[in-house]
Amino acid sequence: QQQLNLRFMGGGDHGLTERSTNLTKILFFTCWHSTIFPAGWFLGAVALVVQYWVDKYCLLRVFQPAPKIGLFLSKVTETFFLIIIVIYSLNLAFMFGGFPFDNACEVTNTTVSEAYIGVVNVTQLFPQEGD
């Protein structure tokens, strides 16, 4: 029976590095483009769910038993996830700090009211009891 089962195990190499790279790539592109396209989080989630179920099916039904591997791949992937979070934070700060889309509408009145010019104290915006 074992020999017969091995004949139908058509899958060869698992390609764990390629699968890990695809996971990291989807997460990176989702983070990179989410600042200008927030719905990308939903598309990225759908892509990750599809990849999860396809990989689960392939690992359980198609591929041969996996060879023993160490922790190197998981450590590298963890490092890349941290790098992705840092890049996402910097990209988010840059995009909302400069916000290049604020000149999308034509401005007819270019004068600014005097109420907006000057120093604003944050505690004035949120008064406390007794003020």
Image (cartoon, helix red, strand yellow):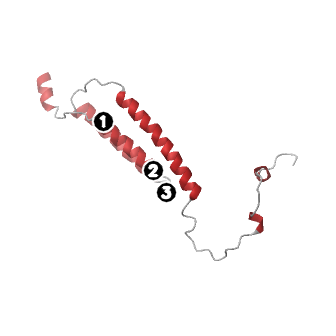
Mark 1 Cα shell of 10 Å, populated few (<14), some (14-19), many (≥20): few
Q: Is residue 110 left or right of residue 118?
A: left
Badge 2 amino acid: Trp
Q: Quadrant of the N terminus?
A: top left
Up-down: is 48 above or below 7? below
Query: Extreme bottom residue here?
Result: 108
Left or right placement of residue 48 versus residue 104 in this view? left
Which class describes the residues within 10 Å of circle 3: few (<14), some (14-19), or many (20+)?
few
Name the residue at 30% across, 25% down. Answer: 69
* Residue with the mark numbered 3: 36
User: What is the three-letter code of the residue carrying label 1?
Assistant: Thr
Q: Which residue corresponds to the image point at 43% horizontal and 33% vertical from the top-left?
A: 78
Specify the quadrant of the image occupied by residue 9: top left
Identify the disc placed on residue 84.
Answer: none
Total numbered labels: 3
Q: Which mark is residue 17?
A: 1
User: What residue is at 27 percent from the left and 32 percent from the top?
Assistant: 59
Q: Are marks 3 and 2 in contact (CB under 8 Å)?
A: no
- Snapshot quadrant of residue 25: top left
Q: CA distance from mark 3 to mark 2?
A: 9 Å
Front residue of 71 and 53? 71
Residue 35, above or below 72: below
Where disc 2 sits, the SS reads helix
Q: Could you say which is closer to the camera, residue 30 or residue 77?
A: 77
Q: Position of residue 75 (x, y in %)?
A: 40, 30
On the image, numbered disc 2 is attached to which residue?
32
Label 3 or label 1, whichever comes before in sequence order: 1
Q: Residue 4's spot in the image, x, y percent?
A: 11, 26
The numbered mark, 2 or 1, whose residue comes first in the sequence reads: 1
Residue 92 vs residue 23: left or right?
Answer: right
**Which residue occupies the foreground of this view, 123 or 86?**
86
